[in-house]
Image (cartoon, rainbow, N blue to C red):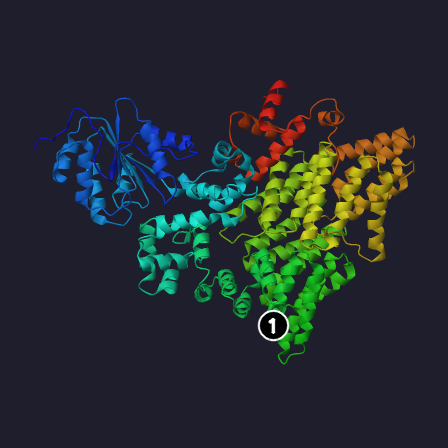
């Protein structure tokens, strides 16, 4: 059989389904240059764009069709999503190609001998799954001559042998994730269509997740409104969904999609439980086969979610009906699978707080004490009646430990005291255990308030009474005793206590508790000035923790914050900045009060560059965070006033600094609260040291007091602190006119610092070029990491691209960019690049 192939193509097709040219560009169209380049640069037999309705597949295909190279003819065929038989597809293709009418066999023969260079665009491929149609398409792909390239836009993934095409290098596929607008594209689009609404970019991106149809319709709905984007602007989008997604969908699939939209995540087994045995899994597969906004969760094979903006619209659509039963069914299923977190969530959504409270009791002490789900449990506390939270000893203990771990000491004490309502009990063993738990809580609470004797007594008695199965509570008690010993300068005892606790954690096989106790060990090494050893230890533990499949907990963030502090002490400023910022981001994500030390570290970095306003800003953020989270003052107030006093002293506000330092020390003596916070064990000696420095600047002779402090630091083994005290003593001797003593003290201090590699004293400014910059002698030099970030910005990289290239968080990139602008005295990235080039930095 001879194939018919006309010498020239007449793309005018008298068909309602085919069109001569691609569709016109929509209003406000922006070219997706990166995606278009990706599609045009890879030469392959099939380019496949798969995504639900409104993801811009047709627009992107049309842009590519208009960019067809010279000598290539682009033919456009719109299937309009309608059901087509194989015969219809073949007839439409033959008509578009100018072939004589005939069946599939004749079309295959013509395609095989087609001499022209053609791009065949099949837009809006039929939406309903059709194995016969897909098989026909596969035969057409296989038979077509080498000069034919196929472009396919579809809401569903055809069941062709796509893996084979991919292996042969003949397939390029873009998914919905590829087609979503990025933050940069949303900004560019708004600048083009509604520059006055540019402030909406982040809100639009958050609401739409980059879904092009949602972006456009939400903006259209908001035309003429005040400059605030509100959720009510999704009316047009709801109409769009009704017509483009739900219209024509079989009723059972529409109902299944509506029900699954109420569930944050689901798998085939849960669908069977919720939608009906023998039907649920099939309906899930049918919905996915039609490309109806159901995505697989990243890193969770077999688990799915309804695309969030679509789920929100379907939830609004279902407001008239009750979903309580659906959530209760899901709650029961998750509880049976041991997923307590999801079980509680669905019980609360189902309006059954009693059921939620009963599931909440299933949280193990180990889960809670490792820091898992603390923020979530605190949110649940706000949704559950207090009577339920205090209804059983187990719930009381759970809530008391959660409140204690987030630093809300008074609330934790009030909660723990409710255990008295369950005493005495007939079962003496349980009574002893409850009392031991109360003593453990009371001991750690006393430690948090700085009351040494009370804490020591309760902790010792708790350890004597806690049963073997309460090993997690025992480890926290041992950790508290270790931290107390470090704070009191009993470093040898702290080492013994920490070693015993670490052995117990290893016997229990808890990687998270082992990491928590290694943090204590690292704190001990840091107190001795062994910064490099502490850094190596915590880096090793951090890497081991990262390799564990355990649930996320605040320990990772705490580890990074401590590593950042150790890097700072050794002068590794870029590494310190990255670790402090990343650790802070982690802590904030977990609502961990340890975030305070992230802000403190960033304040110290700012102070080192003599950026006093920046340092105060970070301290203000730290205080605001602690107050918002209702953290007890004793856990942070002293450290905050110490850092603030250091800055006030630089500004010349000696009376203010003296008053603050004296107030903290007097408060401790008056209330017998003489223990420093767990993560800042040198608070008391540093308060006294800085107070002596204030007195020195006011003309007092403080040599004797400094020698007493120095002797105590050396006796306790606090080598780093001793190095600082040697230098303070040198200043005091010089001020008193004793030059030989000053030289001797300075030499001893510098030798000790050099041996410890103690390069950055606590809250001391860099005396290098940055110091002169603060006085107006020139711009502050950029750090190496800041120069690297600026180079990438100069190359046109977005913040997200900089983050990906440097393997740092987006927040860290923004922080670097803000610092660069501040140092160079500019407000925009383009100005920063120009200024840096003028200064020879680039």
Q: Nearer the viewer, residue 550 or 355?
A: 355
Residue that badge 1 annotates: 392
Give the image quarter of residue 462. bottom right
Residue at 68% x, 62% y: name it: 412
* Residue at the limit of the structure toward the bottom, as seen here: 426
Q: Where does the image place residue 718, in percent across and percent down from the top left?
A: 75, 44
Up the image or down, 39 lies above or below 306; here it is above
* Residue at the limit of the structure toward the left, as seen here: 1
Residue 578 visible (yes or no) = yes
> Left or right: 332 with respect to 697?
left
- Could you tell me which quadrant the C terminus lies in? top right
Give the image quarter of residue 775. top right
Residue at 56% x, 56% y: name it: 372
Q: Nearer the viewer, residue 722 or 30?
A: 30
Residue at 43% x, 56% y: name it: 317
Classify 10 Å Cα crowding around label 1: few (below 14), some (14-19), many (20 and above).
some
């Amino acid at each position: 059989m001879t194939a018919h192939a006309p010498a020239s193509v007449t793309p005018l097709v008298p068909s309602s389904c085919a069109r001569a040219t691609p569709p016109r560009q929509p209003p406000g169209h922006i070219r997706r240059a990166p995606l278009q380049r990706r599609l045009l640069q890879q030469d392959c037999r099939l380019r496949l764009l798969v995504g639900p309705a409104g993801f811009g597949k047709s627009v992107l295909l049309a842009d590519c069709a208009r960019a067809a190279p010279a000598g290539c003819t682009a033919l456009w065929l719109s299937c309009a999503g309608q059901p087509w038989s194989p015969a219809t597809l073949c007839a439409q293709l033959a008509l578009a190609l100018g072939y004589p009418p005939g069946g599939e066999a004749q079309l295959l023969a013509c395609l095989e001998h087609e001499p022209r260079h053609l791009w065949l665009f099949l837009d809006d491929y039929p939406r309903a799954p059709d194995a016969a149609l897909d098989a026909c398409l596969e035969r057409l792909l296989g038979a077509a001559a080498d000069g034919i390239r196929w472009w396919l836009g579809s809401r569903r993934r055809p069941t062709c042998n796509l893996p084979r095409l991919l292996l042969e290098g003949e397939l390029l596929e873009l998914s919905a994730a590829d087609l979503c607008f990025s933050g940069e594209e949303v900004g560019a689009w708004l600048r083009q269509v509604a520059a006055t609404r540019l402030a909406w970019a982040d809100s639009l991106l958050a609401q739409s997740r980059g879904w092009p149809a949602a972006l456009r319709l939400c903006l259209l709905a908001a035309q003429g409104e005040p400059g605030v984007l509100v959720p009510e602007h999704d009316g047009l989008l709801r109409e769009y969904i009704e017509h483009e997604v739900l219209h024509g969908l079989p009723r059972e699939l529409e109902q299944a999609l509506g029900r699954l939209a109420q569930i944050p995540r689901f798998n085939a087994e849960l669908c069977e439980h919720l939608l009906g045995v023998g039907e649920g899994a099939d309906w899930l597969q049918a919905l996915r086969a039609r490309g109806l906004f159901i995505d697989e969760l990243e890193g969770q094979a077999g688990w799915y979610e309804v695309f969030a903006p679509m789920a929100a619209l379907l939830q609004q659509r279902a407001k008239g009906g009750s979903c309580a039963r659906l959530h209760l069914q899901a709650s029961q299923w998750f509880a049976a699978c041991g997923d307590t977190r999801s079980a509680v969530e669905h019980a609360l959504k189902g309006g059954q707080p009693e059921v939620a409270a009963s599931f909440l009791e299933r949280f193990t002490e180990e889960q809670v004490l490792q820091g898992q789900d603390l923020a979530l449990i605190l949110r649940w506390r706000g949704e559950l009646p207090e009577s339920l939270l205090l209804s059983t000893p187990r719930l009381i203990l759970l809530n008391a430990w959660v409140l204690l771990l987030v630093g809300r000491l008074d609330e934790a004490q009030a909660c723990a005291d409710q255990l008295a309502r369950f005493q005495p009990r007939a079962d003496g063993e349980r009574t002893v255990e409850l009392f031991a738990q109360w003593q453990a809580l009371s001991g750690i609470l006393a430690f948090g308030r700085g009351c040494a004797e009370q804490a020591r007594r309760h902790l010792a008695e708790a350890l004597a009474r806690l049963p073997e199965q309460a090993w997690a509570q025992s480890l926290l008690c041992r950790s508290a005793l270790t931290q107390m010993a470090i704070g009191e300068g009993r470093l040898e005892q702290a080492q013994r206590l920490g070693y015993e606790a670490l052995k117990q954690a290893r016997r229990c096989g808890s990687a998270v508790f082992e990491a928590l106790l290694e943090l204590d060990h690292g704190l001990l090494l840091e107190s001795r000035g062994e910064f490099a050893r502490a850094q190596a230890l915590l880096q090793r533990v951090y890497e081991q923790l990262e390799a564990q499949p355990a649930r996320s907990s605040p320990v990772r963030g705490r580890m990074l914050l401590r590593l950042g502090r150790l890097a700072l002490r050794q002068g590794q400023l870029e590494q310190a900045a990255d670790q402090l910022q990343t650790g802070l981001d982690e802590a904030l994500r977990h609502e961990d009060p340890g975030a305070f030390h992230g802000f403190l570290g960033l304040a110290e970095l700012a102070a080192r560059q003599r950026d006093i306003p920046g340092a105060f800003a970070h301290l203000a953020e730290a205080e605001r965070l602690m107050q918002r989270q209702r953290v007890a003052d004793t856990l942070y107030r002293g450290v905050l006033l110490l850092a603030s006093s250091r800055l006030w002293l630089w500004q010349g506000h000696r009376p203010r600094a003296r008053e603050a330092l004296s107030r903290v020390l007097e408060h401790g003596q008056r209330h017998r609260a003489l223990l420093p916070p767990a993560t800042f064990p040198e608070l008391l000696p540093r308060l006294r040291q800085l107070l002596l420095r204030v007195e020195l600047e006011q003309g007092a002779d403080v040599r004797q007091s400094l020698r007493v402090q120095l002797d105590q630091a050396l006796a306790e083994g606090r080598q780093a602190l001793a190095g600082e005290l040697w230098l303070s003593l040198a200043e005091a001797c010089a001020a008193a006119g004793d030059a030989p003593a000053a030289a001797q003290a300075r030499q001893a201090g510098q030798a000790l610092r050099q041996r410890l590699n103690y390069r950055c004293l606590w809250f001391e400014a860099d005396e290098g070029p940055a110091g002169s910059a603060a006085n107006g002698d020139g711009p502050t030099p950029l750090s190496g990491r800041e120069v690297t970030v600026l180079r990438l910005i100069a190359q046109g990289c977005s913040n997200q691209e900089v983050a990906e290239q440097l393997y740092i968080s987006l927040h860290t990139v923004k922080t670097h960019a803000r610092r660069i602008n501040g140092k160079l005295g500019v407000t925009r990235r383009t100005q920063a690049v120009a200024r840096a080039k003028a200064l020879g930095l680039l």
